[in-house]
Structures are given as structure tokens and as C-alpha cells.
Image: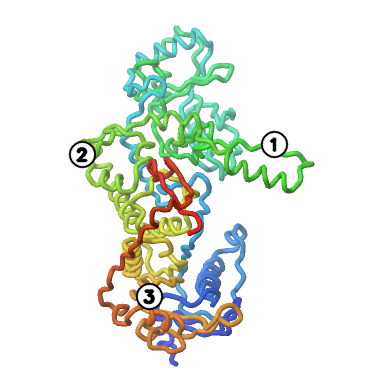
């Protein structure tokens, strides 16, 4: 084969030669690129080994090998699978049936990046309401601020005025000290510690820091230049200043964000104010988890059985909704910022919602709401770029049958199938092309309607120039696949061979394929090959007058269950 012909062949096919991983029997097989490929076969025949241990693992290993030596030291090196060669393999992404690794703080909205864009909306268009008075903040004149600081000087003594320059940003930030020196200032404060400007600050590059410049001090309320000093500090602090007394007590003052009720001032909003992964936004009681954990004490002398019993009791009974944030995960300030929206009355949704109220809505409600929102003034310009990103991701979640999920629902409470479809929706939002996606039985537990929606989603991924490999038994998926690989003939040591490969028609006509034989037995082959399939609704006959013993649940209200009562017959 010529070199050009080989290149063309590898651009159209993924070729695996001599695969011996686990129970694979030195098989060689090819998969078409840019197509939907189903790997099927009896349980234990080697499907997952071929899909995940060969294709996905080799793709990941090659990616890690392409990194420089510095980057590779931070990741665990992956072993090469037991295979002679894999040709034409594009970058790989695995979407397995497992609970997300995002941790207890990950939600439906954060995994799909919807929360990131909603945070931007609240940062740019949100109106701060005082957490104490619930009044919207307003602008404050320089004269009013001068009067406030004079009063504080009488009560607290000498005040240092600091202009914030860096807020919650990683880096060395040596440029702040250089800037302060050029402007004639002698001190900066980094993370609460003061440094002379002529000495470099020793900050951790990979930690977030707050850095302020000490502009001056209030030592007398008769100081004629007091207004000038305050004005200068506000200018360098973008409208905000910190007043720190000799005991270290600090108050925030601003010209734009002041409560008319209690006089409290607030710094300008930042996306981190709405992040429960940041100390700036999370609830200080639950640290952004929305729940508090009461871990029981264990003694060294406890037996293994006692430890296990205590552990399971803790897992079941010791997780309580945070009493302060009521499960929202956010601090009082984040919960007090509201959007001013024009919402049609038919939605019955608060026209001044907090970010937590959006998190409590389902995908279906949020999709309708965001598609109907109307903005005024500067909101039109800001929302023009943000809203399409939110709506498109909500549409992706709807496309994979997850309309019923709340945006704020923790991913640790989802089933394996729901978690997989969440990640699939996230991939749809990434707009990647030329990628090999490997999925593990994505249709498990789906209703027929949702199954078709999921397959439409996979075909949409394929239409972007991606390759899709699915480990699957579902006949609907095989009917819509471009190519099928049937492994077997048995399980374990009796499996690991390619029994058949090709189109569904070729699988059905192969007398050695257990999959083809079973599909032909269950259905008319013509129905599987594209004709409309009948909908079968089973009829359930009554049990008679004799009452059947049942396991009864009453008034269930959890996740999307709404005061449900159900009886499950025993011994059936």
C-alpha cells in the first residue's frame, strides 16, 4: 500500500491490530471515522475492554505523551494497552455511566457551565440589596462619605485609607508595588499583611490574593485635605476604599453601593461573589455544600463492625440542610442580589429573582423563561452575548431528556445514566469536532421517547465531524448505527473475538452472530431496517378481590417527587 493510500485509509478508518487486553484474543478490527459505531455482544465478551481499555486509554495516553516534561509530572502516566498498533486514532473523550467526580459542590448548572453564564448576568446586571435591610443599594456623594469617615474617626481614632487594586487573583503581583512606588506611596497590604513598597512582596503565585495600596491616614477631622485624600483613594480603588483602624478593624466604603437604611457599603460585584467554590461567595456555615455534616466520634477501641455501623448511620442520618443558607450554598450578599426583569405574567416567576431562585427552577422552566426574557437599556447589550449560551445549554439538556432536573441539583444525587447524559449535554455545548466519543450504554433506563431524543443528540455530535463509539445492547441504537461490531461468541475466556462487523443488515444475515440471531427472532428484520415499528402497550389484569401485601410509601417529596404515595406489591 502506498504512503498516500495509507494516509487516506487512516483518515477514514481507525485500525486496531493485535489487541490482547483482558480477554481479547489478539483481534484486529477497524472502525469508520466520523460515524456512529456500536460495539455489542453478550455480557463479558470484551465490549468495554475494546472501547475503553483500548480506544479511550490509548487516546488519553497519546495525549499525555504529547505534553512537555514539566506538565507530565502533574499527571499519572497511563500504561500502554496490550495491543500491537492503533492507527488513525483521533483525540478521545470518555462519557461513562458513573457518578460525577466533580464532588459535592457540583450541580447540574455548574457541570454544563450554565451557572457560569448566570453568574455573569448577575455580576453585570444584578442590583445589590442590603442583606440586613433588604433595601436596594444606591449612590453616595463624596460629601456624605467624608461625613461618615469623620464620624468613624471620632469613634475609632486614626484610620488608614486603602485603595483595593487586586481582588481574589492569582499571581506574584509585584507590579502593584512598582505602581505604588511610582505614585509616591510607601506601603501596600497583601492578604492583611503590610509591606514597604521598596521591598518585593513574597506571594504564592498559585493562590488567590487581595492587594491594596495605603494611600494615606486620617489623623485629624480638621484636616482640610480630608476630602482630597478620600477622593484620591476612591479614584485608585475604582470607587471603593477600606478604612482600617489601629486595632485592624476594617470597614468598606463606596460611592456607588450604599444601603440607605443602615449605611453599609458594598464592593462592586464579581463573578466569584456567586460561586460556592470560592470563599468570597460560599456560605460560611456549610462552605458551599448546602448541607452540614455531623460526623460522630469514633474511639480507637471500636471494632470494625462498630465503625461500619457508625459510618452507615452517619451517611444516612447526619446530612442536614444548612440552617443559614437553606441549601442555596451562598452567603447572604449573594442571596440578596436581584435582577430587574420583564417577565410575562404567564410564567408566575418572581420578576426580581435571586440567583438561588433560578437554581431552584427546572431545566424546562428555565428554558422557557430565558427564551422569553426582555431587557432594557444596557441590559440589551450585555445579555445579547450571554443569553444564547444559556439557552443553547438548556436546549442540550432538554435534548437528552433531562427537562425535569433542577439546575441546582447536586450531581452526586443523580443516577449513573443521568450523570452520563449531563456530560453528553456538556459536550454538545463545547462545539468540539474531530473527536472520538466513547459512551457506555447511554440508553439504560430511558423511556422510548427519551431514547429517540438521545440518539438524535448522538447524531448531532456525529454531524459535527466527530466519531461516536457506543457500548450498547439496545436495538434502536443498533438500527440507527452506521457500523456494528459484535464480540463473542461467549463471555470471559469464551469471548474476545470479532464474530461479525458491518451494517445492521450484515449482522442480521450472519449466522454466527448471537446478536443478529436474537434480533431476528424478536423482530421482523424489515422493521429493524427502517420500517415503522409498532408501539406495544401491555395489558395488566386485576388481582381479584384478595388484597395483596404491599410495601407502602406515603407523601414522598424528594428531588422531583411531589407528595407521591405508592404501594409496591410484595412477592411479585
Within-10-Å neighbours for mark 2: few <14, some 14–19, many 20+:
few
Question: Regarding mark 2 in the picture, which secondary structure is present there?
Answer: helix
In this picture, residue 318 sits left or right of residue 540? right
Question: Regarding mark 3 in the picture, which secondary structure is present there?
Answer: helix
Q: CA distance from mark 1 to mark 2?
A: 52 Å
- Identify whether 364 is placed above or below 460: above
Q: Answer yes or no: do the residues labelled 3 and 1 have beta carbons within 8 Å? A: no
In this picture, residue 75 sits left or right of residue 399? right
- Quickly name the residue at label 3: 478
Q: Is residue 119 visible?
A: no
Q: Answer yes or no: do the residues labelled 3 and 2 have beta carbons within 8 Å? A: no
Looking at the image, the residue that sits furthest to the bottom is 1
- Quickly name the residue at label 1: 297
Work out whether mark 1 precedes mark 2 in sequence or the reverse, and give the earlier one: 1
- Residue 191, given in percent of the width and then of the height, sits at 56, 32
- Identify whether 188 is placed above or below 249: below
Task: Say which of 118 and 195 sits in front.
Answer: 118
| Residue 425 disc label | none
Question: Regarding mark 1 in the picture, which secondary structure is present there?
Answer: loop
Quadrant of the rendered structure where residue 511 is? bottom left
Tell me how the rendering is colored: rainbow
Q: Answer yes or no: do the residues labelled 1 and 2 have beta carbons within 8 Å? A: no
Q: CA distance from mark 3 to mark 1?
A: 53 Å
Q: CA distance from mark 3 to mark 2?
A: 43 Å
- Residue 180, given in percent of the width and then of the height, sits at 49, 31
Task: Say which of 226 and 455 sits in front.
Answer: 455
- Quickly name the residue at label 2: 346
Amino acid at each position: 500500500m502506498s504512503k498516500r493510500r495509507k494516509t487516506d485509509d487512516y483518515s477514514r478508518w481507525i485500525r486496531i491490530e493485535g489487541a490482547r487486553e483482558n480477554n481479547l484474543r489478539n483481534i484486529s478490527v477497524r472502525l469508520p471515522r466520523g460515524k456512529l459505531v456500536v460495539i455489542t455482544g453478550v455480557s463479558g465478551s470484551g465490549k468495554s475492554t475494546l472501547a475503553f481499555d483500548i480506544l479511550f486509554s490509548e487516546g488519553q495516553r497519546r495525549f499525555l505523551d504529547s505534553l512537555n516534561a514539566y506538565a507530565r509530572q502533574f499527571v499519572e502516566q497511563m500504561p500502554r494497552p496490550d495491543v500491537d498498533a492503533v492507527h488513525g486514532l483521533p483525540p478521545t473523550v470518555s462519557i461513562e455511566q458513573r457518578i460525577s467526580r466533580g464532588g459535592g459542590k457540583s450541580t447540574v448548572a455548574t457541570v454544563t457551565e450554565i451557572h457560569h453564564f448566570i453568574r455573569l448576568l448577575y455580576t453585570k446586571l444584578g442590583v445589590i440589596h442590603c442583606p440586613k435591610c433588604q433595601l436596594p443599594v444606591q449612590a453616595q456623594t463624596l460629601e456624605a462619605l467624608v461625613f461618615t469617615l469623620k464620624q468613624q474617626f471620632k469613634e475609632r481614632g486614626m484610620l488608614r485609607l486603602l485603595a483595593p487594586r487586586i481582588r481574589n487573583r492569582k499571581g506574584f503581583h509585584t507590579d502593584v508595588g512598582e505602581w505604588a512606588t511610582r505614585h509616591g506611596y510607601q506601603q501596600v497590604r497583601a492578604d492583611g499583611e503590610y509591606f514597604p513598597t521598596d521591598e518585593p512582596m513574597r506571594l504564592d503565585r498559585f493562590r488567590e490574593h487581595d492587594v491594596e495600596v495605603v494611600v494615606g491616614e486620617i489623623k485629624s477631622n480638621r484636616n482640610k485635605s480630608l476630602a482630597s485624600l478620600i477622593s484620591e483613594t476612591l479614584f485608585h480603588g475604582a470607587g471603593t476604599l477600606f478604612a482600617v483602624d489601629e486595632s485592624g478593624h476594617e470597614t468598606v466604603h463606596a460611592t456607588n453601593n450604599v444601603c440607605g437604611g443602615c449605611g453599609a457599603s458594598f464592593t462592586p460585584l464579581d463573578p466569584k461573589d456567586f460561586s460556592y467554590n470560592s470563599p468570597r461567595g460560599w456560605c460560611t456555615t456549610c462552605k458551599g455544600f448546602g448541607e452540614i455534616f455531623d460526623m460522630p466520634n469514633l474511639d480507637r477501641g471500636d471494632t470494625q463492625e462498630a465503625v461500619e455501623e457508625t459510618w452507615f448511620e452517619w451517611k444516612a442520618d447526619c446530612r442536614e440542610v444548612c440552617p443559614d443558607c437553606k441549601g442555596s450554598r451562598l452567603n447572604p450578599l449573594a442571596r440578596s442580589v436581584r435582577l430587574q426583569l420583564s417577565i410575562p405574567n404567564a410564567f408566575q416567576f418572581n420578576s426580581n429573582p435571586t440567583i438561588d431562585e433560578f437554581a431552584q427552577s427546572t431545566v424546562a422552566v428555565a428554558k422557557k423563561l430565558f427564551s422569553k426574557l426582555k431587557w432594557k437599556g444596557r441590559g440589551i447589550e450585555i445579555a445579547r452575548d450571554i443569553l444564547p449560551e444559556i439557552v443553547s445549554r438548556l436546549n442540550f439538556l432538554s435534548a437528552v431528556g433531562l427537562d425535569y432536573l433542577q439546575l441546582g441539583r447536586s450531581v452526586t444525587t443523580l443516577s449513573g445514566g443521568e450523570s452520563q447524559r449531563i456530560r453528553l449535554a456538556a459536550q454538545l455545548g463545547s462545539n468540539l469536532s474531530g473527536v472520538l466519543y466513547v459512551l457506555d450504554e447511554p440508553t439504560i433506563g430511558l423511556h422510548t421517547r427519551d431514547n429517540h431524543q438521545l440518539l438524535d443528540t448522538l447524531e448531532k455530535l456525529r454531524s459535527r465531524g466527530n466519531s461516536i463509539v457506543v457500548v450498547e445492547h439496545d436495538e434502536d441504537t443498533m438500527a440507527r448505527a452506521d457500523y456494528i461490531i459484535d464480540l463473542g461468541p461467549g463471555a470471559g475466556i469464551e469471548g474476545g473475538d470479532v464474530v461479525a462487523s458491518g451494517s445492521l443488515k450484515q449482522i442480521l444475515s450472519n449466522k454466527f452472530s448471537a446478536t443478529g440471531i436474537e434480533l431476528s427472532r424478536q423482530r421482523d428484520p424489515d422493521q429493524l431496517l427502517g420500517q415503522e415499528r409498532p408501539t406495544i402497550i401491555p395489558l395488566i389484569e386485576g388481582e381479584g378481590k384478595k388484597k395483596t401485601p404491599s410495601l407502602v410509601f406515603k407523601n414522598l417529596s424528594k428531588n422531583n417527587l411531589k407528595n407521591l404515595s405508592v404501594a409496591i406489591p410484595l412477592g411479585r
